[in-house]
Amino acid sequence: MTRIDFYILPDTTLAARLGFACRLAETIVGKGYRLHLHAEDEAMARDLDERLWTFRPDAYLPHALLGSDQAESVPVTIGWEEPPPGDAGVQAMLNLHPAIPEWFSRFERVAEIINQHQDVLTAKRECWQTYKKRGYPVTPHHLRGEG
């Protein structure tokens, strides 16, 4: 059964949420998982693509947008509509979309990031309740600061 982790940030900004997403992606990949970042829309996906190049000056996290030539050979894919191909071997998803994609249960792990922006709080409370109603194990991680 898919394990769900909610990371609860004290910050209110989208920049803080996406910055944490980059650091979390690095941690997830460092644990040996292939990861899919599920963005809200194309603009967010392209923003994440840029951020993954620059979030740390001393590191690089290989990544690609779904549909690109590199998507099958990197540990991190980024998309906003469709899941990665079923045979891509992706074990984890970081969901930055307000809703839960129908195909979330194909992953071993799903991470959700909540910040203190009202729209995000509302959407992710609904996600939390949906996961719990369906019987998925949900673990909260309360973070103290961005760093």
Image (cartoon, rainbow, N blue to C red):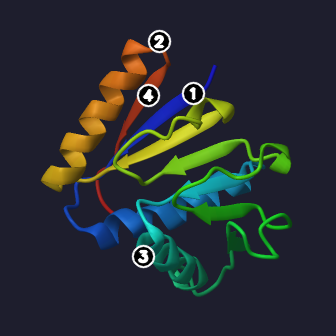
> Label 1, label 3: how many angstroms apart (C-alpha)?
28 Å
x and y, in percent, of residue 98 in the image: 34, 48
Q: Nearer the viewer, residue 144 or 21?
A: 21
Marker disc for residue 139: 4
Contact, mark 4 vs mark 2 (Cβ under 8 Å): no
Q: Element at badge 2?
A: loop
Task: Give the residue number, with chain letter if any, for mark 2.
Answer: 135
> Label 3, label 4: how many angstroms apart (C-alpha)?
29 Å
Contact, mark 4 vs mark 1 (Cβ under 8 Å): yes
Q: Element at badge 1?
A: strand
Q: Quadrant of residue 130?
A: top left
What's under tag 3, amino acid-wise? Ala
Image side of residue 81 versus residue 35, left or right: left
Q: Residue at x 44, y 24 (%)?
A: 138
x and y, in percent, of residue 46 in the image: 51, 78
What's under tag 4, amino acid-wise? Thr
Q: Residue at x 43, y 44 (%)?
A: 112
What's under tag 1, amino acid-wise? Arg
Q: Compared with residue 6, is residue 13 higher up or lower down, i.e. above or below? A: below
> Label 2, label 3: how many angstroms apart (C-alpha)?
33 Å
Task: Give the residue number, with chain letter if any, for mark 1.
Answer: 3
Task: Give the residue number, with chain letter if any, for mark 3.
Answer: 43
For the residue carrying disc 2, how many other residues have a C-alpha within 10 Å: few (<14), some (14-19), or many (20+)?
few
Marker disc for residue 19: none
Q: Element at badge 4?
A: strand
User: Disc 3 or 4, which lies upstream in sequence?
Assistant: 3
The answer to whether residue 110 shows anywhere in this view is: yes
Foreground mark, 1 or 3, reads 3
> Label 4, label 1: how many angstroms apart (C-alpha)?
8 Å
The quarter of the image holding the N terminus is top right
> Label 1, label 2: how many angstroms apart (C-alpha)?
10 Å
x and y, in percent, of residue 129 in the image: 31, 23
